[in-house]
Amino acid sequence: MKGNIKKIGVMTSGGDAPGMNAAIRAVARACSYYNIECVGFYRGYQGMIEGDFVELTARSVKNIISKGGTILKSARSTEFRTKEGRAKAYEQVKKAKVDALILIGGDGTFNGGIVFGKEFGIPFIGIPGTIDNDIAGTTSTIGYDTALNTVVECIDKIRDTASSHNRLFFVEVMGRDAGFIALNAGVGAGAEEILLPEEDLGLDRLLESLKKSKSRGKSSSIVVVSEGDKTGKNVFELAEYVTKNLPEYEARVSVLGHMQRGGSPTCFDRVLASKLGVKAVESLLDGQSNAMVGFLNNKIVTTDIEEAIISSHDINRELLRISDILSV
Amino acid sequence: MKGNIKKIGVMTSGGDAPGMNAAIRAVARACSYYNIECVGFYRGYQGMIEGDFVELTARSVKNIISKGGTILKSARSTEFRTKEGRAKAYEQVKKAKVDALILIGGDGTFNGGIVFGKEFGIPFIGIPGTIDNDIAGTTSTIGYDTALNTVVECIDKIRDTASSHNRLFFVEVMGRDAGFIALNAGVGAGAEEILLPEEDLGLDRLLESLKKSKSRGKSSSIVVVSEGDKTGKNVFELAEYVTKNLPEYEARVSVLGHMQRGGSPTCFDRVLASKLGVKAVESLLDGQSNAMVGFLNNKIVTTDIEEAIISSHDINRELLRISDILSV
Amino acid sequence: MKGNIKKIGVMTSGGDAPGMNAAIRAVARACSYYNIECVGFYRGYQGMIEGDFVELTARSVKNIISKGGTILKSARSTEFRTKEGRAKAYEQVKKAKVDALILIGGDGTFNGGIVFGKEFGIPFIGIPGTIDNDIAGTTSTIGYDTALNTVVECIDKIRDTASSHNRLFFVEVMGRDAGFIALNAGVGAGAEEILLPEEDLGLDRLLESLKKSKSRGKSSSIVVVSEGDKTGKNVFELAEYVTKNLPEYEARVSVLGHMQRGGSPTCFDRVLASKLGVKAVESLLDGQSNAMVGFLNNKIVTTDIEEAIISSHDINRELLRISDILSV
Amino acid sequence: MKGNIKKIGVMTSGGDAPGMNAAIRAVARACSYYNIECVGFYRGYQGMIEGDFVELTARSVKNIISKGGTILKSARSTEFRTKEGRAKAYEQVKKAKVDALILIGGDGTFNGGIVFGKEFGIPFIGIPGTIDNDIAGTTSTIGYDTALNTVVECIDKIRDTASSHNRLFFVEVMGRDAGFIALNAGVGAGAEEILLPEEDLGLDRLLESLKKSKSRGKSSSIVVVSEGDKTGKNVFELAEYVTKNLPEYEARVSVLGHMQRGGSPTCFDRVLASKLGVKAVESLLDGQSNAMVGFLNNKIVTTDIEEAIISSHDINRELLRISDILSV
């Protein structure tokens, strides 16, 4: 099977995530190990359309395992959404003599690959790289563990000042459609309440919980709010609503923002990216395509890519329950 | 002189800053070393009014040197601004047999001490603790160095994602009246432009600079904006203004917020707080009062406290010039 | 069943690990949630023998989730290994009206619990807390993820200086009997070679690999060595052996040591400890005993404690293979 | 004056230090700002001898301000110590049309520059870059502040495990001839005792101090030892000596080693390096030579380079005194 593939193209697309560089390195080194050529397209599908790429050797990826961001840059290409755009991209891929693609990104990236693969028959494997962890077929996406630690470190700092002033803080974290970051970082940071996109626990419950906190002697509190929470109020409106209803609280808001996407990846994300990058190359050489490599039940596996993005794993209700017990 | 002082009261007031605990520890240990009693008032002047304090021994401050926030908590007391409030505070101070005060905080804290000292004749020494560094009579306030590093680490993370997406970021940092954090963290983070409360460089200059950046091949840029910058626009309006005038830029905004006040203090802040805490105790024992301890020309000195807050040291124009050269 | 248990005693024993405090907090809060009393024995079995314990309420564990070490302290008790010592311990447990125990530690800790449980019939649950990850019945022990990140951050720093000087570094990491830290941190830090207690790959292979590295243009290299590696040489002897045989290398040694046990726990370790702590309390209330709570296949489960320590999970040979590919 | 200098060569030599890259960036950008060419010699004087250099433009130094190590690499060149070696170096410098040199390093580096300058009349400016801070003419060398924070963070982690086990730790830090790191990081980490190369306080004092610690209720202790301390015992021998004489102590040793040289520079080191790099270029353009740029009394100044290395500033005895008070 390997005989068919002589050159692999790799790229990062969509929102960047820590560990993408570790995945690029693993792809490049695995190619070198198997004596295959490797090129990296810049800025995702846009660079493919423009024929903007670089040769990746085992040495050209040295010392990037510890770096945040992506050396191949990322973008969201509107041109690639058109048939013409994809045709141009295919021309460039042929011209570059690339036989197969490795796509590092989230569901948008994979959807592009599915359409492209159907239209032009080019084999491809997806590697899940996004801080949101909203991809089925893997317990963890690359970048998620790093983002959790970034959020927890920020909230630890906010708690210092919250405790010093007996204040209530509303901290908004990333996650428009998925509450993984909010829920896990919330438990990790010891948040009193966690508001998620997946379910509306109701504003009454929030007020009740904060009242209870005061009566139990808590002098400061942290409420973690996912970007896409279901209360119908943004984080500033929430703070206003609470201080109107519970004037004994002095509330502050902090929106953590884009720093959640950056930083040197954690050991977990580096090892995960390393395993997935090698597996992606080996899967292509093995004749697989239209699949995503992932980490499930402590093993590296491949999943049909359409399943990986159609289904989405649910929020961990058990962890919500534990969060309630811990904020007693 | 020492004979007069048998018990010192210490407190933290105003915005909290990393290193306040290191200063409390130094005061408590210096008292123990000189065989003086030490108590800590909770929540600044408010705890003084309420007689809410704790005995501090050499052992009760163990392991706090590395902790952010303040174990004595902090507050802004409106009651202390009234004559009645201060009279109550004095009653409690007498009742607690406290002979002298050490006040850790910024100019608001020191102003309170000046009035209190004049009204009731109680000796006091100020220790400059604020992340803003807006106190004359010391090159650095406690917490400033830590805040600079927190900001630089955040911007390093933002730069990862800015570079990956070729984006322009506006990052708002603390400093309503003083641009020390913005200027120094801006240079430290390699910002392209820095907007300060101290002077309005003009929106035209900003546009000009960003145009030049593009033409010189910079693919991503960071603009650091002080809370109190003089452009007349807040950070969101600035981003909008720039993208309207320079549509080639894709701009994002990040407001770092309260995390800048937290975190484990840097070595510099711990050593500074340790020196100032010991010096404050020794100054009181030496018969001094109405003074602030500070760090000037690499020496620990005392300054008349009214001078320390009336004059304010200017922004470092030389560093602004260097920033211009470096963002070439 | 719950009716039988009115008070739970918790303790930490053996080598300390980051996240032990998060586990103590979870135990104390779960007890509070289920209206059960909770006490913490100091210094593991030794404090039990001495009747040295403290009442733990929901409030007394506040803000410890982010702290390294253990507020209950830890020790290895030789007295508890004697029948007399255990009898004393049981007297104290009865006197304190403790109905069941939660033991946080590694296999030594659990062995103590097994003997104690058999002799005196006191129900107990183990929580795996050790940086070494050498416990079956859980994919991760509490503290392991934090230790991995500590090691990777240290090696990142060492690589800065290794690259600057084109040097070879031998870095010794913890793990007398288990190579989990060495293998995972080695892959995470991009090590060229990893030496483990689980198998002797041979000194020839090491020399061969380093020769190959040079010829492939690598200018600096990191070799990660587990404390208990099987080459028969310690890390200093290894460095000497290599420079004798490959004089083109300038080698340095770094022994990371005890800092690997400390530091604020990662989000993963905090969440894991939180889940395991709650589950331990609920398991006891549910009538279970002689079991360890653990994290397997992404679920919190209980295992018979003798199985948990008799069997030990093997080193991940697949990851060793991946490490070889990546150091191409 | 400027007319004479059209191209500047910069290099890093000796032990690497965090912030060297920030200095290289500042030199390259200042050259660009003043329309001068800039090249970087690799591996210090060795690269000069070999004619191994790279052109540095404003863009080629992008994003290096946050990186540890040195992109120009460093080395200690034995060949440069010979007249022949220096003659070769001069040939290469002429061939590269380099008119003036900027040397980033410590006293060894500067000594090389002095000899080279005398022999061949080439103007040069030194920038103090070393973690040891053992250069007169500047309050801080580049890298020193970062190293202090690295050490303090490591000792914070060691203290976690020291406290958990009531242990005594001896921590060896860098500083063969200068105790700056040991003294300042020791105070910052709250060490009980600090042993320095500058003076032998005697082993009796150490035993006395540790006895006193126990009697005052301290349950764990940290002793910071400089590599070159004057007790005549290395850190392992010290630990043995203490446990022999004070068997109530359980002692452990940690040698922090080379990680102290690495890591992303602190804000202070980045700003310092930025200022010194610009000043070095401006000083050369201004006709200066044989000088070192430094930071004294909060100002950037130039000092005659022979003075900068002949005199060496003394250890801060006042800080030793404060350390004694704080470890009460």
Image (cartoon, coloured by chain):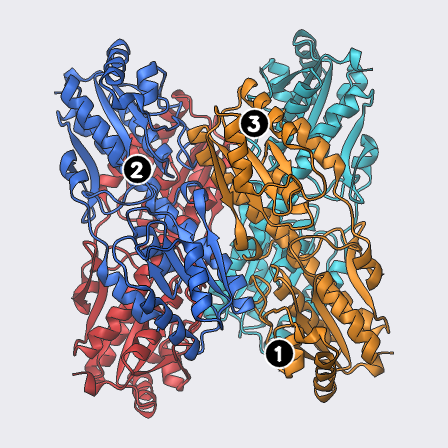
Chain colours: A blue, B orange, C red, D cyan
Q: Are marks 1 and 2 in contact (CB under 8 Å)?
A: no
Q: Label 3 marks which chain's residue?
A: D
Distance between the alpha carbons at the discs numbered 1 and 2: 54 Å
Please report whichever mark, 3 or 1, sits nearer to the chain's N-terminal start: 3
- Are callouts 3 and 1 both on one chain? yes
**Where the C terminus of chain B falls, by quadrant?**
top right
Q: Of circles 1 and 2, which is in front?
A: 2
Q: Nearer the viewer, residue B291 or C168?
A: B291
Q: Is residue B202 above or below residue B303?
A: above
- Residue A304 visible here: no
Q: Label 2 marks which chain's residue?
A: A
- The residue carrying pointer 3 sits among few (fewer than 14), some (14 to 19) or many (20 or more) residues within 10 Å by Cα, namely many
Task: Give the residue number, with chain letter if any, for mark 2.
Answer: A129
> For the point 66% across and 38% down, which residue is it?
D271
- Residue B220 is marked as none
Task: Give the residue number, with chain letter if any, for mark 3.
Answer: D73
Q: Position of residue B35 (x, y in %)?
A: 74, 80
Q: Position of residue A83 (x, y in %)?
A: 22, 18
Q: Secondary structure at mark 1?
A: loop
Q: Secondary structure at mark 3?
A: loop
Task: Give the residue number, with chain letter if any, for mark 1.
Answer: D216
- The residue carrying pointer 1 sits among few (fewer than 14), some (14 to 19) or many (20 or more) residues within 10 Å by Cα, namely few
> For the point 54% across and 57% down, which residue is it?
B263
Q: Is residue A125 above or below residue C285?
A: above
> For the point 52% across and 36% down, which residue is it?
B239
Left or right of C104? Residue D1 is right
Give, as a three-letter code, the residue at label 1.
Arg
